[in-house]
Amino acid sequence: MKPYQLILPVLLICSLAQAQQSYTTIKSGETQAEILKKAADITPTPRQLRWQQLELTAFFHFGVNTYTNREWGTGKENPEIFNPTKLNAEQWVKIAKDAGFKQVILTAKHHDGFCLWPTKTTVHSVKSSPWKNGNGDVVKEVADACKKYKIGFGIYLSPWDMNAAVYGTEAYNDFFIDQLTELLSQYGRIDEVWFDGANGEGPNGKKQDYDFNRWYAHIRKLQPTATIAVMGPDVRWVGTETGYGRETEWSVLPTDNLDQNVVSANSQAEMNIKPLGFLQGSDIGGRDKLKNAKGLVWYPAETDVSIRPGWFYHPTEDSKVKSPEKLLDIYYHSVGKNSVLLLNIPPNTDGLISEVDVKNLKAWTKLRAETFKINLARGAKITSPNGIYTKALLDGKYNTSWTTKANDSTAIIELDLKTSKTFDVISLQENISIGQRIEKFTVEYWNATRWEIASQGTTIGYKRLIKFKPVKARKVRLKIEQSRLNPTISEIGLFKQP
Ligand code: FUL
């Protein structure tokens, strides 16, 4: 290659590198327009983009609480109570895979400090239990099942540890590093590390100052592709444990409130701190929130919720497993609201996912499959007066996208379905590898005499799903009424729920 042949690619890479940043600072005196432009150009890191595209991840809360019938333990449990005689991690993972989950996260250690792997750091583990005569390793069984079924594997390691004698002293940060080292080096690839915000007292009544920065650096070193969630820099808690994300969900946030200690306090706000913290705000990344920002960062939302009222298995909740219809509604309000759904499916005392959970998961999967099987927009004739790359809208490829000419921030995309069709769900996706930009949109259909509104919304982001009352129409249009910069749309879908 001649030197001049290098110039164009190098320039391209430089300009991309400049435009594509997951973080930026704001200098004092920058105008509102300059800040908005910067926000529109913030993009996810490769690890965040991979994570967002998973859409569905599963949580397995399992441990001594499963046997004491509690949600939070004490750290004083006798390890002998842990005995999942029929434990079959392949059953858990296959159920998750069949339901469309792309990754699972296991509670390797919850707040009680009991470790589901034979750690060298404490005797409070499976090693001291009768299960497999103390030779079992739940982390390994789940990790191996994930490899077999080719889905991602993540670990939940509770910073709060009610059992560790060193908790509340600087030595605990070393102890925690040792636990991370074991988990991140003995089980192959780890795709997500999930830190909870709960920070209570240890066995000697002391609280701990968590050395998050040191832990993050360690994770980056041992598992550079893993996302660090919730009490971490890559993924944010959506702010509720109901499964219902917010109407306006920005993945770009002002950095001012994102100090980990503040996040930690806020992540438990629902349970014990009033008034609700910023993570529970109805819009935490809108224009007025960016006005005085010191920095901007890509920090997307994860919606965690349990299929049962509790996170751990309780026999009395066998009759309270969320119905397929409820799970579908949650899907629309989590995955369909620019977030990843982290659905908890707690194994029971036998070490199996209970039949009723399996049944409801299957029926939910069937509902989704039937709804999203046929994109009724396929084959439509598309017109978009100020749009370019219109073909990308229906090519089924996320990384190709429509946008507007000359940086227009409003646009209309009209679909002629060629025959009249009945639909009640629209799916819209922005190309977030370019940024999240759309602030306001309306979906309309032609009722043979005039345009009628089917639905309206604010943000779209990676995915927006909207369910409305069924309409029969031949023409549909998306009006993008406000955007931070030229909007992009990767895919449009119209569906009919059975
Ligand atoms: C919370 C914990 O305190 C719960 O027990 C559960 O693990 C949930 C996912 O996060 O903060």
Image (cartoon, helix red, strand yellow):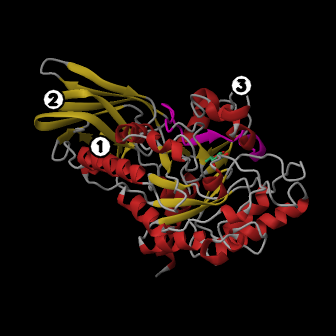
Is 256 a magenta residue? Answer: yes
Magenta region: 243-262
Tell how many labels.
Answer: 3
Query: Label 2: which residue?
Result: 473
Closer to us: 231 or 388? 231
Amino acid at pointer 2: Ala
**Earlier-in-chain disc, 3 versus 1:** 3
Query: Label 3: which residue?
Result: 275
Q: Is residue 289 visible?
A: yes
- Image position of 244 with respect to 394: above or below: above
Query: Label 1: which residue?
Result: 492
Q: What number is the disc on residue 188?
A: none
Q: Percent position (x, y) of residue 444?
A: 26, 26
In terms of secondary structure, where does tag 1 sit? strand
Q: Percent position (x, y) of residue 419?
A: 8, 36
Closer to us: 213 or 41? 213
Q: Tell which residue pokes out farthest to the bottom in this image.
A: 1
Amino acid at pointer 1: Ile
**Earlier-in-chain disc, 2 versus 1:** 2
**Earlier-in-chain disc, 3 versus 2:** 3
Badge 1 crowding class, 10 Å Cα cut-off, few under 14, some 14 to 19, many 20 or more, is many
Residue mark closest to the camera, 3 vs 2:
3
Q: Tell which residue pokes out farthest to the left in this image.
A: 419
Amino acid at pointer 3: Pro
Q: Is mark 3 within 8 Å of ligand 1?
A: no
199 left or right, relative to 379 = right
